[in-house]
Amino acid sequence: MSQQPIQYAVDLIRTARNIVILTGAGVSKESGVPTFREAMHGLWAKYDPQQLATPYAFRANPQLVWDWYEWRRGLVREAQPNAGHIALAHLEHLHSGNVLTITQNVDDLHERAGTRSIIHLHGNIAQNKCFEACQGEPTQIDTIDLDDDGRPPHCPHCGGLVRPDVVWFGESLPVQAINQAIEASQFCDVMLVVGTSGLVNPAAQLPKLAAQNGATVIEINPDTTPITPIAKVKLNGTSGDLLPQMIAVLEA
Ligand code: BV8
């Protein structure tokens, strides 16, 4: 890619006081964590993730949904932060203003790359909670004893099923997370949108909200998305390739 759009993006970032970085599954793809629509390769090729990531699917077939998350948890455990995660963490440390990362991802790769200021809109795949929320929402369960036949474990308080502490389709986002994300999007000068198809709401509304409040949107994605038309700068390519180039220009 010519250096001009990258230079333009870096100039916008350099002069911004408040930066929001919004990430999706694309930023973890180069770490070997499949994107949400590709999360179905192999055994899972015959299922639609939007049919598995729901409370209805879990109630109907807890073993199938539990196994799907155990498979994804294994991928996240084996994954390492990639050059894109590391560049975003570096941007947070380099920039003199406020830099907040808002992620739709349920992995911890941003944190493992060194990002400190982060909001998870859709939860954390490594954590579990009681499906019945018996002690209130979330009833987090820190230690579970997996019996050796891999059945979904039971809540130590009420005996109900244990589920991953993620936000499923049809479930509301954590109130504090989405409220903080909305406020940050309204007040940022630049929103850097990386690796999201912009199809899942309410997260997909954040770039529009930022732009409506005067922010400049920069998008990094190899594809065109519903966010592309509102992006002042569109960098066509992968996060693992483009973000380190941007940091190199920023530090030059
Ligand atoms: C809710 C956790 C209230 C689980 C996930 C309007 C308003 C509000 C809600 C809705 C609405 N319309 C419809 C809804 C309902 C629904 C929704 O949005 N449906 C869509 C599909 C139409 N939303 C909800 O249900 C939300 N809840 O709003 O509560 C409510 C309550 C009841 C009824 C209605 C509303 C909850 C949504 C959260 C769902 N949980 N994750 C889990 O992970 O198992 S969503 C999950 O999918 C991810 O977290 C992520 O958010 C999403 C996938 O999106 P992306 O991250 O963008 O990933 P994707 O694979 O799609 O795209 C990857 C991109 O990366 C691509 O563009 C690709 O080109 C790019 N890429 C690839 N490689 C690279 C790359 N980019 C850079 N570098 C690369 N190397």
Image: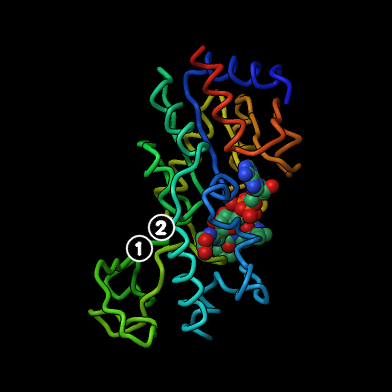
Look at the image and tell me in which quarter the N terminus lies: top right
> Which residue is at 50% across, 79% downward?
58
> With respect to residue 182, does 188 lie above or below?
above
Q: Does the beta carbon of the residue at mark 2 sit less than 8 Å from ligand 1?
A: no
Q: Is residue 226 above or below residue 47?
A: above
The amino acid marked with disc number 1 is Gln
Neighbour class for label 2 at 10 Å: few (<14), some, many (≥20)? some
Task: Count every numbered label the image shows and give the total.
Answer: 2
Depth check, front residue: 245 or 200? 245
Q: Amino acid at mark 2?
A: Asn
Are there few (<14), some (14-19), or many (20+) residues within 10 Å of tag 1? some
**In-image side of 227 versus 244 (left or right):** right
| Location of mark 2 (residue) | 124
Element assignment for label 2: strand
In this rendering, the answer to whether 65 lies above or below 5 is below
Name the spot of residue 181 as percent of width and height, x first. Answer: 48, 41
Q: Residue at x 66, y 73 (%)?
A: 45
Residue 34 x/y as whole percent: 58, 57
Residue where numbered disc 1 is placed? 127
Quarter of the image for residue 190 reads: top right
Q: Regarding ligand 1, which quadrant of the image does it lie in?
A: bottom right
In the visual, does 220 lie left or right of 129?
Answer: right
| Residue toward you, 20 or 177 | 20
**CB-based contact (under 8 Å), mark 2 and mark 1:** yes
State the separation of the CA atoms marked 2 and 1.
Answer: 6 Å
Residue at 35% in and 63% down = 127
